Amino acid sequence: MASMSAIVVVVLCAFAMHAGFLVTNAQLSPTFYDETCPTLSDIVFNVISNASLTDPRIGASLIRLHFHDCFVQGCDGSVLLNNTDSIESEQDAAPNLNSLRGLDVVNNIKTAVEDSCPETVSCADILAIAAEVGSVLGGGPSWDVPLGRRDSLNASQALANQNLPAPFFTVDQLIASFAAQGLNTTDLVTLSGAHTFGRARCSLFLNRLYSFNDTGNPDPTLNTTYLETLRGICPENATVDNITDLDLSTPDQFDNKYYSNLQELNGLLQSDQELFSTTGADTVDLVNSFSSDQSAFFANFVVSMIKMGNISVLTGTDGEIRTQCNFVNGISSPTLAAVVSKDPKVNLVAQSK
């Protein structure tokens, strides 16, 4: 009973830390598919669980995919759309180019779902469920995912380049980027904690190792021992094939070690280390809090993920339920897209995440 009371207190504190938290969109509900696709959760879990047997990074990749979807014109599955005559894929935006992972797993989920519940479940909802499963498989928190999103008819490569926070952002830039999506500083620090597992390319932090801000010296907020380790992995001529763990402590485990790493100046990306090393920033106290209390981090992560999953969702009759996640309905390949898009009745406006 005492432990249950402690959990309740942590959850209530998490909601308090998210002042301005918007209640879940009234048209979204965890029970949305209970009658129309009762096996949905099991299908998604089984596909991802099987994928994780050969790809320990898949959980982190799916959380990132959901994040990169929601920050561009909302959680509408637009990040999944391939190039056509009418759509410039968000996958080719600078923050996504050759770095988005898990697209094949999402397609496998969609195929299995269509076999069981045809034309019923949106790709946007599959992304939201997949992110939760990714957390669980990594040892992180679980939550009831609000469902009922519909899929976009377009994408926006331009917005993807504009909205997705860069790995070299300062705290002020990060706060502004999240605020533009209706997310606050607590959400910023909490969601950044997803970097507790997964990998990153050397190109995203190479300047920290050799010439930070063109000074000719490494980033002074980088632990010198960690610096030498990273230089061994990432030489100055590192290619896109050079990658390393985001969390040097427990690289495949979803836990609060990410925050302990920041305290020890072992944050991999500049945008991560900035949360702790920026003097006077509100983010510092949050890093310290989550480092000392994993339950608090987990409770806040659930709140922030649900909050992020609410960004500009399409519901009701807006958008559509795609039968293939990579193309809007009626288009199954770029060749067919070139023919279909000539029909003036087809409205496929290009946009981005």
Image (cartoon, rainbow, N blue to C red):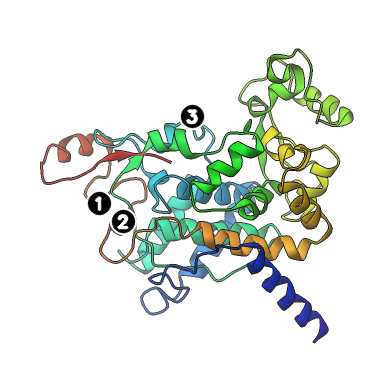
Counting residues from the start of the chain, the first of labels 3 and 2 encountered is 3
Task: Please identify the quadrant where the C terminus is shown.
Answer: top left
Label 1, label 2: how far apart the Cα atoms are: 6 Å
45 shown above or below 160: below
Percent coordinates x, y for residue 246 in the rendering: 71, 40
Neighbor class of circle 1 (other Cα within 10 Å; few <14, some 14-19, many 20+) is few
Q: Is residue 329 left or right of residue 214?
A: left
Q: Amino acid at mark 1?
A: Asn
For disc 3, the marked residue is: 94
**Gap between marks 3 and 2 measured at Cα:** 28 Å
Q: Who's the residue at 89% across and 29% down the image? A: 225
Question: Which amino acid, by three-letter code, is at mark 2?
Answer: Thr
Residue 261 lies in what quarter of the image?
A: top right
Image location of residue 45, percent across then percent down: 55, 64
Residue that numbered label 1 is attached to: 329
Q: Between residue 240 and residue 104, name the one nearer to us.
A: 240
Closer to the N terminus: mark 3 or mark 1? 3
**For numbered disc 1, what is the local secondary structure?**
loop
Please, which residue is most extreme toward the top here? Answer: 216
Relative horizontal placement of residue 346, taking residue 195 as reference (left or right): left
What secondary structure is marked by label 2?
loop
Q: In the image, is residue 100 above or below residue 67?
A: above
Residue type, numbered disc 3:
Ala
Q: CA distance from mark 3 to mark 1?
A: 27 Å
Q: Which mark is residue 323?
A: 2
Choose between 194 and 159: the one closer to the eye: 159
